[in-house]
Amino acid sequence: MGKRLFGIDPEVVGQIAGEIKEVVALGVQMGVVVGGGNLFRGLEASSRGVDRTMADYVGMLATVMNSLLLQSALETIDVVARVQSAIEMREVAEPFIQRRAIRHLEKGRVVIFAGGTGNPFFTTDTAAALRAVEIKADVIIKATKVDGVYDRDPVKFPDARLFKKISYTDVLTKSLSVMDATAISLCRDNRLPIVVFNLLKSGNIKGVICGQAIGTAVGGEQ
């Protein structure tokens, strides 16, 4: 969305694609989970009278739109990418199949996971955690609009404190806005580390992958 109030900013999509290309050039296997909030927010729509189940399905379709545009941006710069959707739509995307996804990754292709989990009442965060566990990822890197995990909203509170490291348990007990509780619990149960960082700063994706001290590391007991 960039600085727009709604929709898609092609420049932002191109920037993200370029940074993904830098990571792929390092030989890193990368799967991407894309949300759809720039087009439609199911939870917000349900609060205004839309049936929650239907609203969530529309939100999942929005993630497919974003995924296809990211795929196009990657292919424009010679990065081979595949979109796998949890909601079957064979004309535009492959169905999600775990073994096929892993095979794509082994061949150096970027796999973009669309359609959430394919079920209502689950967030994009949970979809990311689920897909990461299924493809046996080493880490989830969660791109946000802030520098990491804070003790309170840094937009509203200038004195908010940034955590460099924090445990899954602390995220849950302190109700910190990292991921929803289901996603955090899934990562904790599978010992899958998370790094939360600012997507808007150029070079951060590669920096996180290369082990630089960027953002907040969420993991075992600190």
Image: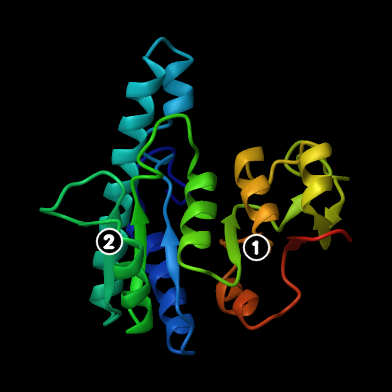
Q: Which residue is mark 2?
A: 83
Q: Is residue 206 above or below residue 175?
A: below
Type of amino acid under label 1: Leu
Residue plotted at (64% across, 54% down): 187
Check disc 1 and report its element: helix, strand or loop.
loop
Residue plotted at (76% across, 75% down): 213
Provide residue 17's location: percent of width, then percent of height. Answer: 39, 70
Q: Badge 1: few (under 14), some or many (20 or more) residues near its Cα, within 10 Å? A: many
Which quadrant of the view contains residue 73? bottom left
- Relative side of 190 to 84, left or right: right
Check disc 2 and report its element: helix, strand or loop.
strand
Colour scheme of the rendered structure? rainbow
Comes first in the chain, label 2 or label 1 = 2
Type of amino acid under label 2: Val
Q: Which mark is residue 192?
A: 1
Provide residue 196's location: percent of width, then percent of height. Answer: 67, 59
Q: Which mark is residue 158?
A: none
- Relative side of 65 to 169, left or right: left
Dots 2, 1 in contact, CB < 8 A: no
Provide residue 171's location: percent of width, then percent of height. Answer: 78, 45
Q: Badge 2: few (under 14), some or many (20 or more) residues near its Cα, within 10 Å? A: many
The front one of 218 and 220 is 220
Residue plotted at (38% across, 35% down): 119
Which quadrant of the view contains residue 82? bottom left
Nearer the observer, disc 2 or disc 1? Answer: 1
Q: Is residue 198 above or below residue 137?
A: above
